[in-house]
Amino acid sequence: MASFLLGVNVLTKRILFRALVAVTTVCALGSAFAQESAESSLARVQRTKVLRVGAVAGAIPYFAKDITTGKWEGFGPDFAESLGQKLGAKVEYVETTWGNAVLDLQSNKIDAMFGMAPTPARKEVVGFSDTLFDNTYTVVCKKGIPQKTWEQLNSPDMKIVVDVGSSHDQLATRVLPKADVSRLENSGAATMSLQAGRSDCQVLVILLAQPLLAKRGSIGTMYIPQPVYTAPVSIGLRKETDTGMQKAVNAWLADVRAKGEVRSVILKNMEKLAGVPASAFPPEIKF
């Protein structure tokens, strides 16, 4: 009996010891995970020397991926490489979509998303840099529609088309409440409505309007209605209490803007990727 009790006692100690080791391991892993989650974006970039940037395939002139080499082009990658050099980090591109980029920032899959509009809804969940550039709103109208002001476009007999939920939609809601506005599922569908003659004008920012006309010049004419409205374009960042990354990005941004590099990078990619020369931009357009 004593031998049996001794065996049970030894077995119990072994079980308790293994349980203690397991709990200690779980606690250590939990602590390491918590420490990693608490690490700021800037601290992670400085530690790993890697800047993770979201990239959207086919989003010319923002992003374009060479299917042969896998290399990313566009003013998003150009700006990203410049920022990476400033931070002493290699840029790692993470393919995403405009719709998923916010979630990728929230889940710490990427550190930055170039070309993101700082809408009020997005500001609730992600951080933003200062304005990278202002994208001017235009209307592309079918042949025969004369140039009009926004006030003249705001008429029940004007058929306006926009992509639903976009900044184009937000502007039309705000300045064209009296117009006959159609809201379609995406920008391509809106363009098809214009091309088919179902709509008179499509609201588009100039960096989308110019490539459209470069490919399909017969679709209509681009106007910049008065007064001029613009949409700020920024760099999406993780929303965090540590503002180190935001300050570092804004410092880089102030430097490249002062040197005129923002405008030169945009115009270079518009011509290279979209076939739109710098001369196609009216003098009132500023980047």
Image (cartoon, helix red, strand yellow):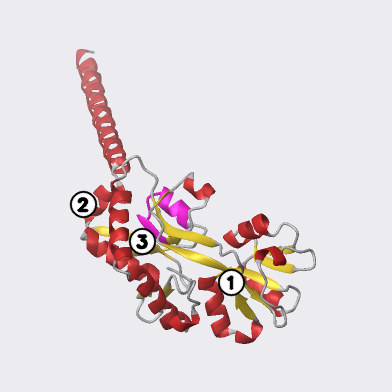
**What residue is rendered at 45% in x and 62% in y?**
96
Which sits earlier in the primary sequence, circle 2 or circle 1? 2
Which sits earlier in the primary sequence, circle 3 or circle 1? 3
Q: Quadrant of residue 225?
A: bottom right
33 in relation to 279, above or below: above
Q: Is residue 21 visible?
A: yes
Mark 1 lies on a secondary structure that is: loop
Q: What mark, if any, has residue 47 been given in the picture?
A: 2
Q: Which label sits in the foreground, 2 or 1?
A: 1
What residue is disc 1 on? Answer: 224
Q: Estimate the x, y position of residue 107 in percent, counting from the top left.
A: 41, 49
Q: Amino acid at mark 3?
A: Val
Q: Which label sits in the foreground, 3 or 1?
A: 1
Which sits earlier in the primary sequence, circle 3 or circle 2? 2
CB under 8 Å between callouts 3 and 1?
Answer: no
**Disc 3 to disc 1, C-alpha distance:** 32 Å
Q: Which residues are magenta?
A: 101-114
240 in relation to 170, above or below: above
In this rendering, position of residue 287 left or right of residue 187:
left
Q: Is residue 277 visible?
A: no
Mark 3 lies on a secondary structure that is: strand
Mark 2 lies on a secondary structure that is: helix
Q: Nearer the viewer, residue 243 or 141?
A: 141
What residue is disc 3 on? Answer: 53
CB under 8 Å between callouts 3 and 2?
Answer: no
Q: Say if the magenta span includes residue 110.
A: yes
94 in relation to 63, above or below: above
Q: Could you classify mark 3 by the number of other residues whose Cα lies within 10 Å: few (under 14), some (14-19), or many (20 or more)?
A: many
**What residue is rendered at 44% in x and 48% in y?**
126
Q: What mark, if any, has residue 181 been given in the picture?
A: none
